[in-house]
Image: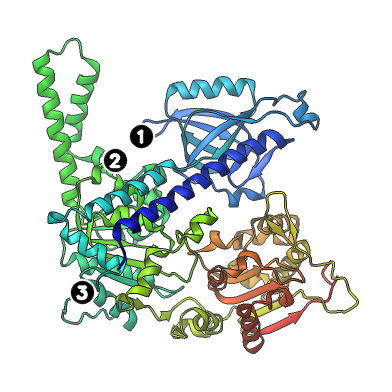
């Protein structure tokens, strides 16, 4: 039996470790910038210098400021996203005549004390929302005397919500009485009790396959928890949407959450296409344009009674001296009545209330309770964030794939303590009866799919007939490995070598050139005309940001690719999760005699990379280095059997 109090206490310790790691990394980053800066900084989480641009007000009445920066090939790798916290900084000696620009060390970077948030970013411009007019004036004054930079900040709000939710879960679970339902759910989720199921008449959705129908049946029958395990390309979102709609046949309203705003927006957009009334809770800056009309703020302002409320607020804020005390009291009472009415109407009309897991702690959801909580992309959600939403529900339905990328945890101590192990992953082991694996995949050629199926999904996946034998060209094979291993015993194999960049990432310059040649050779084999007419798209994936930057740079230097650039996307594995392309080229980078492969040992990373491909998968890498690991040995044997294994002659791709 797991002691709930000790369990939640331990989770709080792990969250605190992660927060401390983020704060320390942030401070070290500021110190390093102050000590070592000799020019501009183009890093995923930092831009320096930035120029101040226009200031204006956004739709929410917040003051915003434009920051202009130099655009380079790293634009696609920015960590800056709408809604993320940022801080501005400057350097003590940031003038051209200072020792800093003469090779000296200079002083530490100075952080401005204003918490700002990204509103928009792209094409060399970042718009940030400011906390006040005073903050704008302060930034403007310092910007006139110093060069400014912008850096991603630490999202303290998320950590606060997780810590408070864990404390509430511990407290709520010991009170009894009205919390008996939560105690039952908590005990099932911790493994102290077995989940229950109702028996209902069989459901049938002719447009879904057998495993999808089974998943929905289990969702509606579950009393505490059910899990839809959706490997790549198996229609997880389609299944989840039908499960939500079927649940709404039995319940008035459900809560739908996910760890990221993008994931929340995606599932909600699919629900809206099925005419489901969705109320989206959260910061509108973090929502997609399609979701803004469903946002709480937009719906609130569109309510028929809002005009009266707005007029009352205007009177109360602008005519304090001429309005009597009794009159003010009546107006305030009427304003409160209208606020309560508008809020109640918005929630009463909504069938689905949606937000991020952290967003479920928003004040307007404080006293809301739901029979069912759906968590999409649960395999990418930190467990403490899940508990914030679980506190508001009687039962939990999770959807995701724990064989793909887990949530990011930076603290090694927190990883060792289990923070990167998700609640969904734990439940799959604790309650296999609650899990339904979706087994028909509609994305990949079956030869691309079969290795992933065998290694990660117990060979249970099957390719749908329309995808099983699909190829870009009938003369092609679905799998190719371009091997960069040494071919001659007398060669020092200096062509393909991994190098660490100043940011700590890895690159392999000769392998990057080979990727460019492989792309060109493949396009020529298929024909550029066919690529254009049939809109064949390409993805180049690498585990390392440094290699992604290098490949982008090489692509831009090649005149051949200019007309095809809209067909080719280059990025990291993390950036490609949830996406797919007709052709995927993977650059593995690692090349050393010791068989060191770093985080390529996290095989879920390779599972994501390989399963982005619909019709063609090309892997570029050193087979000797990778073969030290049994996964890559097996993968190479699979490709030799089902596709082409091509050895590269050293120096042949200059």
Q: Is 412 situated left or right of 363 in this image?
A: right
Mark pair 1, 3: CA separation: 46 Å
Q: Is 536 situated left or right of 113 in this image?
A: right
Vertical position of residue 92 compared to residue 268: above or below:
above
Vertical position of residue 400 compared to residue 548: above or below:
below
- Judging from the image, the colouring scheme is rainbow
Task: Answer yes or no: is residue 291 visible.
Answer: yes
Q: Nearer the viewer, residue 336 or 196?
A: 196
- Mark 2 or 3: the one toward you: 3
Mark 1: secondary structure: loop
Q: Does the CB distance between marks 1 and 2 fall below 8 Å?
A: yes
- Identify the mark nearer the N-term, 1 or 2: 1
Q: Identify the residue at the far right of this view.
A: 490
Vertical position of residue 113 compared to residue 69: above or below:
above
Q: Give how far across and how far down residue 436 sits, in percent.
A: 33, 77
Q: Give how far across and how far down residue 290 sits, in percent.
A: 37, 51
- Identify the mark nearer the N-term, 1 or 3: 1
Q: Which mark is residue 196?
A: 3
Q: Is 38 situated left or right of 346 in this image?
A: right
Residue at 73% across / 63% down in the picture?
A: 512
Q: Which mark is residue 60?
A: 1
Residue at 27% across / 44% down in the picture?
A: 296
Residue at the disc numbered 2: 297
- Mark 1 or 3: the one toward you: 3
Task: Answer yes or no: is residue 209 visible.
Answer: no
Residue at 51% across / 61% down in the picture?
A: 416
Q: Would you call the spot at circle 3 few (<14 residues within 10 Å), some (14-19), or many (20 or more)?
A: few
Q: Give how far across and how far down residue 295 sits, in percent.
A: 30, 46
Q: Does the CB distance between marks 1 and 3 fall below 8 Å?
A: no
Q: Nearer the viewer, residue 309 or 535?
A: 309
- Identify the mark nearer the N-term, 2 or 3: 3
């Amino acid at each position: 039996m797991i002691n709930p109090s000790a369990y939640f206490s331990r989770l709080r310790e792990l969250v605190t470790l992660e927060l401390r790691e983020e704060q320390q990394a942030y401070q070290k980053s500021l110190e390093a910038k102050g000590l070592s800066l000799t020019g501009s900084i183009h890093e995923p989480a930092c831009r320096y210098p930035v120029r101040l641009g226009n200031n204006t007000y956004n739709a929410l009445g917040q003051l915003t400021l434009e920051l202009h920066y130099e655009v380079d090939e790293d634009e696609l790798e920015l960590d800056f996203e709408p809604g993320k916290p940022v801080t501005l900084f400057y350097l003590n000696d940031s003038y051209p005549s200072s020792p800093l620009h003469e090779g000296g060390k200079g002083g530490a970077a100075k952080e401005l004390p204003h918490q700002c948030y990204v509103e928009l970013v792209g094409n060399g411009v970042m718009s940030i929302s400011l906390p006040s007019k005073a903050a704008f004036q302060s930034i403007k004054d310092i910007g006139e005397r110093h060069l400014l930079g912008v850096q991603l900040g630490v999202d303290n709000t998320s950590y606060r919500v997780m810590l408070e939710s864990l404390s509430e879960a511990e407290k709520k679970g010991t009170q009894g009485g009205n919390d008996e339902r939560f105690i039952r759910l908590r005990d099932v989720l911790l493994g102290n009790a077995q989940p229950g199921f109702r028996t209902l008449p069989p459901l049938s959705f002719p447009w879904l396959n057998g495993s999808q129908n089974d998943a929905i049946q289990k969702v509606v029958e579950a009393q505490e928890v059910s899990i839809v395990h959706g490997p790549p390309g198996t229609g997880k979102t389609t299944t989840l949407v039908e499960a939500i709609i079927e649940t709404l046949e039995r319940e008035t309203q459900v809560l739908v959450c996910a760890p990221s705003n993008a994931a929340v927006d995606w599932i909600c957009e699919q629900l809206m296409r099925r005419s489901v009334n969705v109320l989206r809770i959260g910061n509108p800056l973090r929502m997609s344009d399609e979701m803004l009309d469903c946002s709480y703020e937009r719906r609130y302002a569109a309510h028929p009674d809002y005009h009266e409320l707005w007029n009352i607020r205007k009177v109360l804020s602008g005519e304090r001296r001429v309005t009597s005390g009794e009159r003010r009291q009546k107006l305030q009472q009427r304003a409160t009545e209208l606020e309560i009415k508008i809020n109640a109407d918005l929630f009463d009309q909504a069938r689905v209330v949606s937000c991020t897991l952290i967003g479920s702690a928003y004040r307007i959801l404080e006293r809301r309770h739901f029979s069912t909580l759906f968590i999409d992309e649960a395999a990418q959600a930190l467990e403490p964030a899940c508990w914030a939403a679980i506190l508001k529900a009687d039962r939990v339905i999770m959807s995701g794939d724990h064989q793909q990328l887990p949530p990011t945890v930076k603290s090694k101590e927190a990883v060792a303590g289990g923070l990167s192990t998700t609640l969904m992953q734990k439940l799959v082991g604790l309650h296999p009866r609650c899990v339904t694996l979706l087994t028909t995949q509609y994305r990949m050629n079956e030869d691309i799919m079969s290795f992933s199926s065998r290694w990660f999904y117990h060979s249970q996946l099957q390719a749908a007939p329309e995808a099983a034998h699909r190829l870009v060209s009938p003369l092609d094979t679905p799998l190719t490995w371009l091997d960069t291993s040494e071919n001659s015993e007398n060669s020092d194999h200096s062509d393909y070598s991994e190098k660490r960049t100043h940011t700590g990432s890895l690159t392999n310059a000769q392998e990057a050139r080979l990727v460019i040649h492989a792309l060109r050779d493949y396009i020529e084999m298929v024909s550029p005309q066919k690529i254009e007419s049939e809109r064949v798209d390409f993805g180049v994936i690498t585990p390392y940001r440094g290699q992604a930057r290098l490949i982008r740079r090489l692509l831009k230097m090649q005149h051949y690719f200019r007309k095809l650039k809209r067909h080719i996307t280059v990025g990291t594995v993390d950036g490609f999760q949830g996406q797919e392309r007709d052709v995927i080229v993977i650059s593995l980078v690692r090349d050393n005699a010791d068989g060191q492969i770093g985080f390529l040992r996290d095989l879920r990373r390779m599972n994501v990379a390989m399963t982005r491909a619909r019709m063609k998968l090309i892997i570029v890498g050193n087979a000797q280095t990778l073969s030290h690991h049994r996964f890559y040995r097996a993968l190479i044997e699979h490709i030799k059997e089902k596709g082409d294994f091509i050895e590269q002659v050293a120096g042949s791709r200059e």
